[in-house]
Amino acid sequence: MLGRLKQLIGKLYVIALMAYAIWFGYFIYPLIFAHGGHEEAAQHSISTDLKMPGALTAEEKALHKIRAEQKATETTDLGYVVLKEQYVKGHFHHIGMTVETDETNVCIKCHGAVPHNKAKTIRAFLNMHAFYIACETCHINTMAKPAQAPWTFRWYDKKTGQVVANPPALVSPDLEKYGNYGTKIAPGTQADNGTFRFINGEEERVFLERYLKTKDAMDSTEQARMKRVMHNKVSEKPLLCEDCHNMEKSYLPFAELGYPPRRIDRLENTAVVGMINKYRDFYLPRFFELHGEQSQTPARK
Amino acid sequence: MGKSYIKRHVVMLLSALLLCGTGTASAEDELDCLLCHKYRGLSRIDENGKFRLFYINEVIFKEGPHVRIKCADCHQDIKKIPHDPAKKVECTTECHLIEPSGQKNFSHKPVADLLAKSVHGKLDAEGKPKKDQQDYPGCKDCHEEPLYRPLSFFKGKSSGVSERGLARCQTCHRTGDFAESFYKHVTSRLRKMRDPKEIVGICAKCHGDKEFQQRHKLDDVVTSYKETYHYKALLFGSQETPDCTDCHVVKGEGVHFIESKKSPTAASNKKNIPTTCRTSECHEKAGEKLAGYQVHVTYDKDKYPLQHYMLVFFTWLTAGVLYFFLTLIFLELLRRLFPHYSFVKSPDDDRHSAG
Amino acid sequence: MAMPKYKKICERNGKRYFFRFSLHQRLQHVVVFTTVITLSLTGFPLKYHDKAWAEPLINFMGGINVAPVLHHIAGSILLGLFVYHTIYWIYLFYTRRVLPLKREGRLTLGNVGREFLNQPMIPNKKDFHDLIDMFKYLLYFTNRPPRYERMSWKEKFDYYAPYWGIPVLGPAGFILWWRDEFTHFLPGIVLNALYIMHTDEALLAALFIFFVHWYNVHYAPEKFPLGTVFITGYLSEDDMIHEHYAEYVKVMTEQGLQDEIKSQHH
């Protein structure tokens, strides 16, 4: 019995050695034949990334070139992914801070994480807000006055989509990350039994993913119908800057969300509100009318 | 005319009002640019689909020489916030800093002039634009925001600011951060402002690109350089072996003056190579024949026949020996796995295999 | 060239062990393997600098400022050993083979050459036949494994691999190390050639040692996990039968143990 077992182990060892010999042959091949750094030779061939059927227009080519450059370091979708990058090509100033990207928000699955581009003067600000505030926080379809919003607000984890505690970086100046908390504020409802549910929660995510998988099989009317349903909670016309940045009653409960008095003061009083008030340009209602083309600031007339 | 005149005045008035209102602006940041630009998400996708990030990392920014100038010194078109899309920064404009050695405003123009007459300049000797203009670099193609790399010399040498050394400066230079800033400036200049690995990466941006090499009929100098000990030592943290600029910058000139090896003054010109290699701190004591060493070997059959055939010989010797023995070992293991099988059974063999 | 002070067969716990290597030879082997391992660990991170393991390994070996120094030291020792070994070999050959010939008055070039070719480490016709026999055996054309003498062709290959490798690698490394001095009289392109010789031959040597040689002496099923002959200098009876059957029969007969000779099995 013992002898047989010993024999079996011996055979297994021989088989293992044979596998090792084959692996070794495979392992040494590049060591022998790829001399030095020759493996790196394939770098930087950007134009080879254009694998589209037919001839491309100049714009398509330019766009593909940009995408290819970005793809060298990332894999997923345009706009969304780029934020992951610590180094942006042609960016003079150092970024030096990696970011947590939102993996769960349903809106950015289609609209991207850098969605605002219409209002020339404030689009970057809006994208900056979108970095730590979920789209549906401001783009909410509500008849109620913002100050009496029926929602409660919570931070969610950008990776899991689950409710998390208020980010400690808000309170401690040492930890300050200027919006890069790995979390976002989103509206939700609190049931009587105390359970909290985000307006765009797990159910909505499943709905969207199913839609994205099947939409190519639908005709355009069907797609439009689905989109209408998906967007019934949100509104293209968002809340205004002053709905939060005002001295009386903010739409977002900053204190509840963990902002210390020092920061609330900056958000509701001096710095930001001052800027909004002093520049008519900053008034949000105008930007959809203007489509970012020209400014109708009274001061410029 | 009239419209813009009024506009400018309103803008100035509003800027003044804002400054009074916030009162948080630093000396470097009169418009309080960081009020918004400190946010990591400040960004947009531009008309060409290109991602633009407007974030400024204040902590890193303060580690470089530009901390002493105002944002608006470079971004001169921005006079108010919020502002229209900013224009590209022109590095050769004079900034408001007075150059300490004279009474003139500081500018990077001499650097641009030097670059223009080097092999990297956009115009040829007759002043006509060279072919493939897009391949000739501007400032930002090679430069990001510069950062100080101070050196401490107080009893031995290491990276960083020597507090004791600095304290001596501050005995007299007490105001502001003058002493620290100059300390960092001077000690950073005592070595390379940038890590040599970074320099190699910058040159490789273009010189490592296959299509670029074909357009300009250049060898793959990046890959060949990376096979030298010069690069490998840098890669593992040495600061002593040469990067691209150490061997290619014309002797006695600033780093922006690199010439084609055809130019008689070029550092890589055949008759200058002995001097280039034997510069002080490098192969100072080497024989003149060291210049015959080929740095950028591509193993091309026609250009580098010796290296090519040696490589072929050693490759096949190695492959031959190893795969022969590998096969042998594999067969031996197979024989151990199935010991009793045989094509021929002679009586003599049977006697032995019985054991 | 075994010295008489070693018993051909020694018995321990009822088992027979056969003499293979003297202490002097084993010590030389210790020097070889310590220096070769050091040279590999400090050299290959540079050759394969773009591999993920390169940087951690060179840092483990003391970083880019220390590892090359270790490399130079180990290389110098190995090169020194090579010179020593060669002189030692020539000395032994002279005192044991050439001097007796001289005493007998038969000192001709032909006789010295014949003596040289009879040395156990010199490849001979039997090695060639053994090689063919081995392939016959491995490909199942016979069930009789080759019967090796004191040194099998594999061991001779193992021996001549460094004997070719060190002269290729060592002086090349030495000149590259002292390039500034050598280029006063050597053309620079010689350095290019030496560089290829040094790194490519090193690859061959290392891959050979760490796979083929280690298989033969450590990984092989009956040896695993560690063949001990490089420590003790003696080989067990089973291994002796397996690897050096001809030598086994010869030694047993010499010692008057012909009745106890076991059959060759596999």
Image (cartoon, coloured by chain):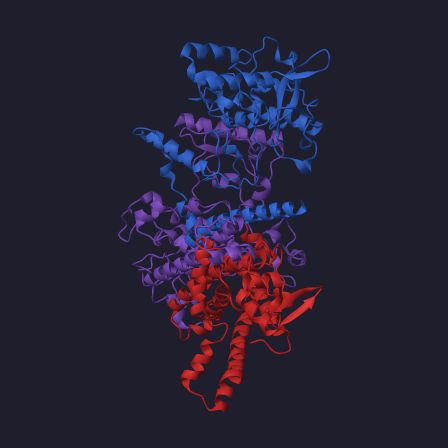
Chain colours: A blue, B purple, C red
Q: Quadrant of residue B117?
A: bottom left
Q: Residue furthest front?
A: B347
Q: Residue at x 42, y 37 (%)?
A: A69
Reply above or below: B336 against C229.
above
Residue C49 visible in rendering: no
Q: Quadrant of residue A222?
A: top left
For the N terminus of chain A, the image quarter is: top right
The x and y percentages for residue B79 are 49, 33
The x and y percentages for residue B354 are 55, 54
Using residue B193 as the reference point, say whether residue B303 is left or right of it. Answer: left
Q: Residue at x 56, y 33 (%)?
A: B40
Reply above or below: B82 against C261.
above
The x and y percentages for residue B100 are 52, 54
Residue A199 visible in rendering: yes
Q: Residue furthest top?
A: A143
Reply above or below: B212 against C123.
above
The x and y percentages for residue A283 are 53, 19
Say how many tags the image has.
0
